[in-house]
Amino acid sequence: MKNAEIARLFEELADLLEIQGANPFRLRAYRNAGRTIDGLTEPIAVLAEEGAKALTALQGIGKDLAEKIIVVCETGELPQLNELREQVPPGVVKMLRIPGIGPKKVAALYKELKLETLDQWKAAAENGDVADLKGFGKKTAQTILEGLEQIEQAGMRVYLADAMPVVEEILAALSKCEAITQVTVAGSFRRRKETVGDLRVLATSTDSATAMNALAEHPQVEKVLAQGDTKQRVRLRTVFDGSVKLEMDLRVVPDKSYGAAMQYFTGSKEHNIAVQRRALDRGLSVNEYAVTRDGEYVCGRTEEEIYQAVGLAWVPPELRENRGEIEVAERGEIPELVEVSDIRGDLHMHTTATDGKASIVEMAEAAKARGLKYIAITDHSKRVTMANGLDADRLRAHWKEIDKARGKVSGIEILRGIECDILEDATLDLDDEVLSEADWVIAVLHYGLKQPREQIDKRLLTAIKNPNVSIIGHPSGRIIGKRPGADITYSDIFKAAADHEVMMEINAHRSRLDLNEAHAAAAKDHGIPIVISTDSHSVNGFTELQYGVFQARRAGLTKNDVANTRTFKQFQKLLR
């Protein structure tokens, strides 16, 4: 198991224990353990193999925690957590996904009002029971209703980034099975959607029964739900978001149908309908088995054959949403999409000066180790009090520390930056005098996201027109599946950004991915340089970069559309 997966188990354990009213010191210990594990640069499993002594050398890890970590690393499970999942109803656990409704409030509503299902929570918020409860009120009730709407829209889907290590582990194991000759994952996962639901895996095999046994016996598989000669459905063991377990379909297909099956099961439905219409116009039929003419096999071994048969260039999976890619493929003008290896700089990250877990030097060294050539240290401004945001004096002192770090870390450029809040009254959190001293200023919306569109637009335009602002970070402020973004007139904002040479960010954090693909494509059309940054809060945060690149690819962005693919000297020329 990856460090992040193990860390989430301890965080979930703390949440469930808090719902049950456990000792606060015990809760803090589990949460600190999760943060420690998530911030490690080496796999916790390696230390676990050395025994409890190696684990207790870590900050905040005592003997009891060390023993639990060893159990998790050896079995993939935390028995105490499994017991709590049985005791706390799934509907209560799901409520933890609503921002602003923490474990304490969930526990109070669960115990006082006996709310166990999402329908009960909704009814209590609507009929006034929540508002009447001491310490709550109408605002909390409204927050619950909005959160429930987000949960309903998200359904049983999880972040792509959360599912990816599990899927990759299973695929790696299946690829080693001697009976399997080819294997890949299709569906929304292959299209790199922000969230994924049920997973679809395709394989060719000399022995389908052996192939399906390989999946059934994998440690990540909890139960085989159905199995035929060439189809199998399983439930995975990993619990996402405290209550979601994904299911996976395995389809074993003949070699001659592998490409057709990949194209069909990758989707999207809208894209496939467009492909099938083109086939019909040519007297062909396309399905998951092959391209046929009058019932006779034409092709199907590769996806390239499928697209060629209907007069199209091969379309990258990320673009298959029927948003103009068919016409582009017909002209043979599919762009060469940006790759993770193209990114040379990361321009949004945090250190221990605010809410980060690593020092300036540690972040710079970690970025350098990943092949980056330049970074910007962008800690929070003072408005974000919960993150120990910086006022002007502390910021200037922080920048002096960045200057010192430049002399300690060679081979990478370090910009003096700041993530500056755009306040609710349409002013910036720091004055122009201090902002003018920065190399890189990210202006962001963190608060007041529910303000009317006119005020949100005014705030963003104020930042864009400020000559010290370099970029608008995570423009909508959304949290996927949990908090909707601000209501923005994107056409006006993008026109102003283009006019004032202000860049736009794709924040690569798995829960943000903001701009989304549609808005990123629109920003590109306005000629706005896009920056893909990780918003890292630890040395491990740089792994999020790939998810921002996936988002950029879904927007049709090329290397030239992304500002931080440039060399440092080239990038400097883009700065205002």
Image (cartoon, rainbow, N blue to C red):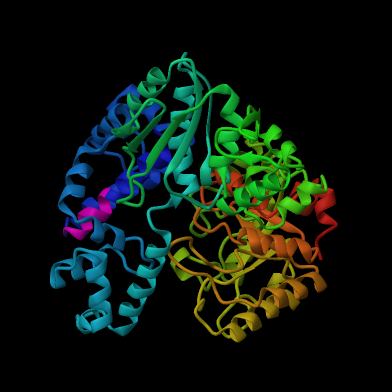
Tell me where residue 190 sits by quadrant.
top right
Q: Does any portion of residue 410 appear in the rendered image?
A: no
The image shows residue 138 at horizontal and vertical percentages of 31, 84
Furthest-front residue in this view: 294
- Which residue: 50% across, 79% down? 448
Q: Quadrant of the N terminus?
A: top left
Q: Write down the region rendered in magenta.
A: 13-20
- Which residue: 46% across, 35% down? 167
Query: Does residue 443 appear left or right of residue 207 in this picture?
Result: right
Residue 125 covered by magenta stretch = no
Q: Does any portion of residue 495 appear in the rendered image?
A: yes
Question: In terms of depth relative to the viewer, which is nearer, 551 or 249?
Answer: 249
The secondary structure making up most of the magenta span is helix
Question: In terms of depth relative to the viewer, which is nearer, 424 or 512?
Answer: 512
Query: Does residue 19 appear left or right of residue 267 in this picture?
Result: left
- Which residue: 68% across, 60% down? 520
The image shows residue 310 at horizontal and vertical percentages of 73, 41
Query: Does residue 145 appear left or right of residue 167 in this picture?
Result: left
On screen, residue 543 above or below 180:
below
The image shows residue 280 at horizontal and vertical percentages of 67, 46
Please tell me how many numbered marks the rendered image carries: 0
On screen, residue 351 above or below 44:
below
- Which residue: 34% across, 22% down? 50
The image shows residue 347 at horizontal and vertical percentages of 67, 54
Q: Quadrant of the C terminus?
A: bottom right
